[in-house]
Amino acid sequence: MIKKTFLQVTAIFALTLLVGIFYNLSNPKRIQFIADEKSVDFTQSDSLLNALRIQDSLSRTADSIRNSAQSREDSLKLALEKHKQDSILAAVKNDSLKRVHDSLKTVNQKKEDSVKNAQVTEIVKPVDIKIDFAKALFDKKYRFIDARDEADYNAGHVQGAMNIPYHEIEKYKDRLSGLPKDQVYVTYCSAACDVSIDMAYYMAKMGFKKVYIFHGGWDEWKTAGYPAN
Amino acid sequence: MKKIFENKKVIVTLRIIIGALFIYASFDKMSNPEAFADIIDNYHILPFWLVNGLAIFLPWLEFLTGFFLVMGKWVKSSLLIINILLFIFIIALTQALFRGLDISCGCFSVKPSSTSEVWLRIVEDIILLAAAYLLYKYYPSNSNKTEIENNNLLNQNT
């Protein structure tokens, strides 16, 4: 009896193997028999953070140059007003004003170029990021998406984060579809969770191009004492 | 309990219910192996190289055991596998519950929205395991089966 059961169990397993292999090979949604190892890759996080910092510093420099040029322009305008009767002086000042305009134009051009260069790289595959880059994106007022359930979200979340529970994604799909797809989004959940990853890949599949996964999640954010509701 | 399970109608009904449940549970997983692999991976109990294999073969194992149960063939062997499967499901769900993992059960559907309370799923599986175990225990082997069927026939005649 035991031998018979053992033989039948073996036969069921063998049949399962055969049918499973055949079905998977013929299935349009087939998957690899052995999956690739999933690993969190933070290499882009640091370089993107640096790019963001460079962008900030360039932006600040451009602003200060523009401000000083503006004040120079203002003072020259005043001087021009004051001495408009003096044609020679006016000519000199006009010339200097022109130079200031030129320099201002160059600075603005440089600023635009630097912002373009340093702007967050357009991605399709979600990028794993650390808390420092997540904070930098938060400071830039990019949208955070809390993939946890409503109860967890209500208990505490990143300031201004939008709650789209991944487990109820069908219910919240409209909310997600309403978001512009070329904006930057940061998904997060708790800490030992996968819904932020699932949500990010779900969004990437929907056509969102700049999705970041903040792996530290709410737990790390809260511990760091960053803005929260 | 033995008396209840001596009733052929009870045995057949239970056999078909459990079999049908396993067949039903396998469909969505079969058609969405990638989503099912993600769900298995989220349990964090298997090495990555086993995840896809299980996602491919487990639905078929459920389907075939369910199919054999409904057809009334190789019933004891199918029940043995089902009992082992249910026991593993309960362990997996319980560890997820205690570790506080925010996961989709993947029990009957691979949709993320199929999540319900994990403890409810554990209770469901325990009930199913109890039924499958009792069926396995009291299901007549071929020699006994003929005897019970004869007794039933005798009872019906008298």
Image (spheres, helix red, strand yellow):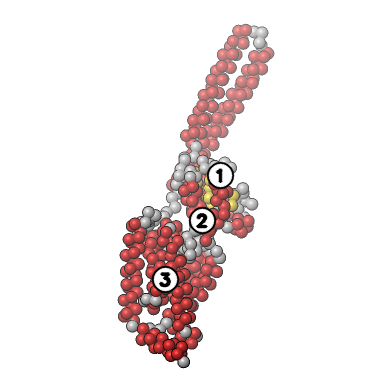
Q: Which mark is residue A195?
A: 2
Crowd class of label 2 (few under 14; some 14 to 19; many from 20; radius 10 Å): many
Which of discs 2 and 1 lies nearer the camera? The answer is 1
Of the two numbered discs 2 and 1 on the same chain, state the one appearing first in sequence.
1
Q: Which residue is mark 3?
A: B66
Q: Quadrant of residue B33?
A: bottom left
Number of marks in the rendered image: 3
Q: Which mark is residue B69?
A: none
Q: Quadrant of the N terminus of chain A?
A: bottom left
Residue A93 visible in the current orientation: yes
Between A148 and B61, the one lying in front of the other is B61
Residue A135 visible in the current orientation: no
Secondary structure beneath dot 1 equals: loop
Secondary structure beneath dot 2 equals: helix
Q: Chain of mark 3?
A: B
Q: Chain of mark 2?
A: A
Instruction: Measure the C-alpha gap from mark 2 to mark 3.
Output: 32 Å
Residue type (three-letter) at the residue carrying disc 3: Gly
- Labels 2 & 3 near each other (Cβ < 8 A): no
Q: Which mark is residue A179?
A: 1
Q: Residue at left 64%, top 21%?
A: A74
Answer left or right for A198 relative to A172. left
- Labels 2 & 1 near each other (Cβ < 8 A): no
Between A150 and B35, the one lying in front of the other is B35
Residue type (three-letter) at the residue carrying disc 1: Leu
- The answer to whether residue B56 is above or below residue B132 is above
Secondary structure beneath dot 3 equals: helix
Residue, far bottom: B158
Between A188 and A168, the one lying in front of the other is A168
Residue type (three-letter) at the residue carrying disc 2: Val
Instruction: Measure the C-alpha gap from mark 1 to mark 3.
Output: 44 Å
